[in-house]
Amino acid sequence: MDEKLRPIRCHLEYLLNKADEYQAHLIHRCRLMTFAYLVEGLCRVVPTFLKSCHPFFSYLEHTARSCLPHRPPLPLYIRTQLLQFSQQLCSRLEELILTYASYNFLTLEETNPLSISHFFIGHCQVNHIKLSIYRYCCPAPFQPSPSCRLFKLMRWNVERERGIEREAGEREEQERGGRKTSTEYYFLCYEEIKLWSIGHWVQMYPNPQTEDIYEW
């Protein structure tokens, strides 16, 4: 097991070194901002690097956390080590994102479709449930209201396969149309008084079941 961890640790060190490299070059290149192509390049650095980290995050989380009937669990110390790798990279990427945001090369505002308010840190599967995990770079209001005191720090996209316990006719329809899933969203939040909570986001308004498009 220790031998198998060695290449994983090497890949982690490679990604951490790349993050250090991007951050070190940021200040140097800011002195040359008269060149428009440098500005455009710096705006693309973090989004591109985050995407390149997706496979590594997915491998770590899936290997450490997935619970599948046909696969026996790994030893605890191996799973702990993999999750520590994930946490190391996660913390370093958060620092990188905040640094680039401080120079206005990206935005953390969640309402902006081009923002990097949160980033993907892996996925895992528990039987027929798939979890995709995201981490917020800085506290994001749970609701757009100015009086909202609840802030999001993590999100889980929970995908459940539909029709597993449905009637035979529905299962046949599912097989013909391909596997269908439904997605729910869960957040890890805290209040201003630093009390942690975990809950399920439920849309109340507008009514998600309404057929009247004018209510939207």
Image (cartoon, rainbow, N blue to C red):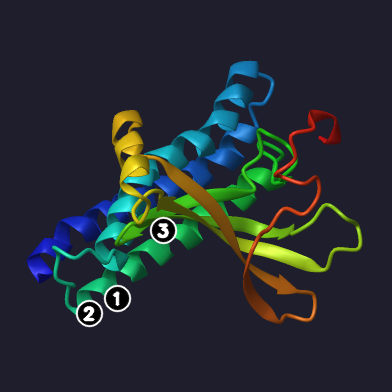
Q: Position of residue 92 (x, y in %)?
A: 48, 58
Q: Which mark is residue 77?
A: 2
112 versus 167 height, above or below: above
Count how many numbered circles sit on residues in the image.
Answer: 3
Q: Distance from label 1 to label 3 (Cα)?
A: 14 Å
Q: At x 33% / y 65%, what residue is drawn?
A: 85
Q: Amino acid at mark 3?
A: Leu
* Number of residues whose C-alpha sits closer than 10 Å to that of mark 2, classed few (under 14), some (14–19) or many (20 or more): few
Q: Which residue is mark 3?
A: 89
Dot in front, 1 or 3:
1
Q: Distance from label 2 to label 1 (Cα)?
A: 5 Å
Assign the N terminus to one quadrant of the image: bottom left
14 sits to left or right of 197: left
**Lower sequence index among marks 1 and 3:** 1
Q: Which residue is nearer to you in this view: 203 or 91?
A: 203
Q: Distance from label 2 to label 3 (Cα)?
A: 19 Å
Q: Amino acid at mark 1?
A: Thr
Determine the secondary structure under disc 3.
helix
Determine contact: label 2, label 1, CB under 8 Å.
yes
Assign the C terminus to one quadrant of the image: top right
Determine contact: label 1, label 3, CB under 8 Å.
no
62 sits to left or right of 213: left
Q: Residue furthest top?
A: 36
Q: Which residue is mark 1?
A: 80
**Lower sequence index among marks 2 and 3:** 2
Q: Which residue is nearer to you in this view: 93 or 160?
A: 160
Q: At x 70% / y 73%, what residue is drawn?
A: 190
Q: Position of residue 157 (x, y in %)?
A: 50, 53
